[in-house]
Image (tube, rainbow, N blue to C red):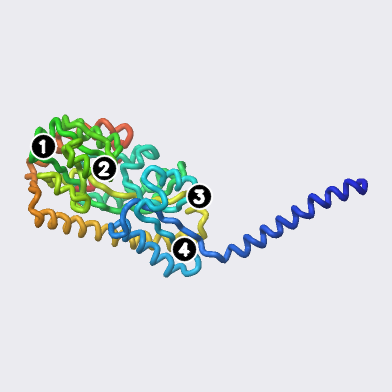
């Protein structure tokens, strides 16, 4: 090798070696820094989901001091409904808690939770979600980079309208606001009603102006969004669930130190119990507040009337059986028997 070649190589290699060494030194220095976990959601801090995120932050930083730092971004302050899933998959955010209706593009089986009148009550829903079949859905999207960590409740849904809804025939021809969900659209088509996709934030105005005539929401949403002020009737149908799945980026989660990951999962399990208890209490309180307001009649269905509604929409189960799985639907039905 001649002198010129040696000189050129020394000019290229020396800076590279120095840069590599500097990078390793920087990485080593950074290894003592806490792991930053960004938890983004679209609701207020005062909601069960918002309170759950804050409790997760508190417990994680208390029990893993110096190891993790949790940053909570409420009210779509970091990412909104339309961007949060992409942000998670890109690793720009680490934990989300979207509604279960948001997952149909990632795992068709999760459409199970939108099937109407599948669960008799919250206790049945809890039994299913804690069962082997329910827990398997949490890990059913890892091939797409999404790992489910927990289910958080928001409550069972009730039907509202400006006319009494006692039997399925009463819903015919009405325009119901729905989330963007194929199952929920078919639910109202089965009642010979007209589903209209509409953003949550636009629902009140839509009901107020008559763009839509009815909606489905837990009592907490009905009261907090003042839906009872623009709907004369609420039917306590308990026909579906509005739940969330707490999810994380699979690569991020699997890359955490084992002890940190295990403790975070323990904390999430504790927080889930608290969130779900809060959700139940919030819905009970919201129902009472609606009654106290005196603007809306709450209709309680008899067992026979509820059976009519269930029979009217049961064909929706069959329509989605191929996507959800007959075995999964059967397991969910069995959860109605303690």
Q: Tell me which numbered mark, 3 or 1, is placed earlier along the sequence.
A: 3
153 and 174: which one is in front?
174
Residue assigned mark 2: 202
Residue occupied by mark 3 = 251
Q: Are marks 2 and 4 in contact (CB under 8 Å)?
A: no
| CA–CA distance in space, label 3 to label 4 | 18 Å
Name which of mark 2 and mark 1 comes first in the sequence: 2
Please report the residue visible at 50 percent of the width from the left and 68 percent of the height from the top. 66
Does label 3 or label 4 sit earlier along the sequence?
4
Say whether residue 29 is left or right of residue 118: right
First-in-chain label (2 vs 4):
4
Quick one: label 3 or label 2, which is nearer the N terminus?
Answer: 2
As measured in the structure, the alpha-carbon distance from the residue carrying label 2 to the one carrying label 1 is 31 Å
Crowd tier of the residue under label 1, counting other residues whose Cα lies within 10 Å: few below 14, some 14–19, many 20 or above:
some
Please report the residue visible at 33 percent of the width from the left and 60 percent of the height from the top: 52
Q: Is residue 229 left or right of residue 63?
A: left
Question: Would you name the residue on which mark 4 appears?
Answer: 69
State how far apart marks 2 and 4 are (Cα). 35 Å
Q: Alpha carbon of mark 3 to alpha carbon of mark 1: how far?
A: 47 Å
Q: Which residue is mark 1?
A: 308
Q: Whole-percent x and y of residue 42? A: 34, 51
Of circles 2 and 4, the one toward us is 2
Q: Position of residue 244 (x, y in %)?
A: 32, 49
Instruction: Tell me where residue 256 appears, x and y as whole percent.
Output: 51, 57
Q: Earlier in the sequence, mark 1 or mark 4?
A: 4
- Mark 3 or 2, closer to the camera: 2
Marks 1 and 3: in contact by CB < 8 Å? Answer: no
């Amino acid at each position: 090798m001649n002198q010129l070649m040696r000189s050129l190589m020394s000019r290229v290699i020396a800076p590279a070696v120095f840069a590599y060494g500097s990078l390793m030194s920087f990485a080593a220095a950074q290894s003592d820094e806490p792991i930053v976990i960004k938890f983004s959601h679209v609701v207020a801090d005062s909601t069960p989901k918002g309170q759950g995120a804050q409790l997760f932050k508190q417990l994680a930083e208390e029990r893993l001091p110096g190891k993790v730092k949790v940053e909570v971004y409420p009210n779509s302050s970091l990412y909104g409904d339309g961007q949060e899933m992409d942000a998670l998959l890109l690793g720009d955010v680490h934990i989300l808690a979207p509604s279960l209706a948001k997952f149909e593009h990632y795992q068709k089986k999760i459409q199970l939770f939108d099937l109407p009148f599948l669960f008799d009550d919250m206790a049945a829903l809890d039994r299913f979600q804690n069962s082997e079949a329910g827990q398997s859905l949490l890990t059913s999207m890892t091939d797409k980079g999404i790992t489910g960590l927990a289910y958080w409740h928001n409550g069972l849904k009730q039907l509202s309208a400006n006319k009494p809804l006692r039997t399925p025939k009463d819903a015919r021809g009405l325009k119901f606001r729905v989330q963007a969900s194929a199952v929920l659209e078919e639910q109202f088509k089965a009642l010979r009603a007209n589903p209209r996709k509409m953003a949550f934030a636009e629902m009140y105005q839509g009901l107020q102006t008559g763009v839509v005539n009815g909606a489905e929401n837990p009592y907490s949403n009905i009261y907090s969004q003042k839906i009872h002020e623009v709907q004369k009737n609420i039917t306590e149908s308990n026909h579906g669930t509005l739940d969330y799945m707490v999810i994380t980026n699979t690569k991020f989660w699997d890359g955490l130190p084992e002890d940190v990951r295990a403790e975070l999962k323990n904390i999430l399990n504790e927080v889930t119990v608290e969130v779900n208890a809060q959700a139940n209490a919030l819905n009970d309180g919201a129902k009472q507040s609606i009654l106290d307001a005196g603007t809306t009649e709450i209709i309680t269905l008899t067992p026979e009337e509820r059976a009519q509604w269930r029979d009217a929409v049961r064909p929706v189960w069959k329509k989605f059986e191929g996507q959800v799985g007959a075995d999964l639907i059967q397991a969910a039905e069995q959860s109605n028997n303690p």
